Each structure stands twice: as structure tokens, then as C-alpha cells.
Image (cartoon, rainbow, N blue to C red):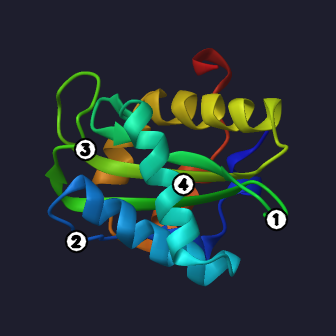
Amino acid sequence: MDLGDLIAPDAVVGSLKANSKKQVIQLIAEKASAITGRPVREIFDTLLQREKLGSTGVGGGVAIPHGKLPGLERIFGLFARLPKPIDFEALDDQPVDLVFLLLAPEGAGADHLKALARIARHLRQGNVAEKLRASTDRAALHAVLTEEATPDAA
């Protein structure tokens, strides 16, 4: 699964200003709603319910909020870079500044898990996170997110 299939250039936010985890979730839900046509409240509630199970802050300043939505046609990704890191109750207790939202159709099953794994692997690879932190340009961020993994990092 290629990240280029998950995230369109218009689903990249170069500078998302938020002061809390809940505000980040609200803002990415709004952006995802505008792109997918799904109701903001449905996306927000789905993400909030998932966070109640445990933080999607996976460490290293990265969070991957995710959830399944009935009626969604395909797996959808959205990336946001925060200029000011926020507390996301991450596994390593480090503040988060890179957020990759993943929404999947209700019946996505294994594809949802494969997409989550692919995102996590890519963001941990080499200097991908560094490159993402160094830019606010949407096109440059999209290019970093969708560049192919190097064979030795896979």
C-alpha cells in the first residue's frame, strides 16, 4: 500500500494551530469533512471514541488518530503539521507535532491495519519526520509523505 493512495495533496495542512489534543481532533475532523463530505460531528466523535481507548500518540512527536466510518467509500488520509507541539498523551510522553489522520470504511478490516502500519513505518523511516518538521509548504510535505521507502529501511 502506497501512501500516495491514501493522501491527496489537498489533504495536507502545513501549519495547524491548536492548543490541545481535542482542538487538533476538531480541526482535522473539519478538514476531513470538507474533503470527504462526511459530517464533521461523525468524524470527530469517531476519533474521540478511539482516543478514549488509548492515545494514538505513537511516540517521537507523531500521532495517528484513526477510525472507521460507515458509508466511507475508501481509506482516507490527512496530514497536519503543528507549528507548536502539544500534549497528546503519547506513549513516550513527548509532545506531538506531526499528525496523520486515517479514516477507513467500516468493513476495511485488514486494509485499515495495513494502512496504519504503513504510515507508522514511513514516519519512523530515516529522516522523514525531520523533513516534515522542516517545511510548511503543502507540496513539499506531500512529496515527503508519498516518497517511496528506501529498500534498507523497509
| Front: mark 3 or 1 | 1
Mark 4 Cα-neighbour bin, 10 Å: few <14, some 14–19, many ≥20: some
Name the residue that disc number 2 marks: 17
Q: Amino acid at mark 1?
A: Gly
Q: Amino acid at mark 4?
A: Thr
Please identify the quarter of the rendering in which residue 88 is found: top left
**Sequence-earlier tag: 1 or 2:** 2
Rendered residue at 79%/39% (across/down): 1
**Sequence-earlier tag: 2 or 4:** 2
| Front: mark 2 or 4 | 4
**Sequence-earlier tag: 4 or 1:** 4
Q: Is residue 107 above or below residue 7?
A: above
Q: CA distance from mark 1 to mark 2?
A: 30 Å
- 128 or 117, which is in the foreground? 117
Q: Is residue 13 above or below residue 102?
A: below
Q: Which mark is residue 71?
A: 1
Please tell me whether mark 3 sits on a helix, a strand or a loop. strand
**Sequence-earlier tag: 3 or 4:** 4
Q: Position of residue 119 (x, y in %)?
A: 58, 38
Q: CA distance from mark 4 to mark 1?
A: 13 Å
| Front: mark 3 or 4 | 4
Q: CA distance from mark 3 to mark 1?
A: 30 Å
Name the residue that disc number 4 marks: 46
Q: Are marks 3 and 4 in contact (CB under 8 Å)?
A: no
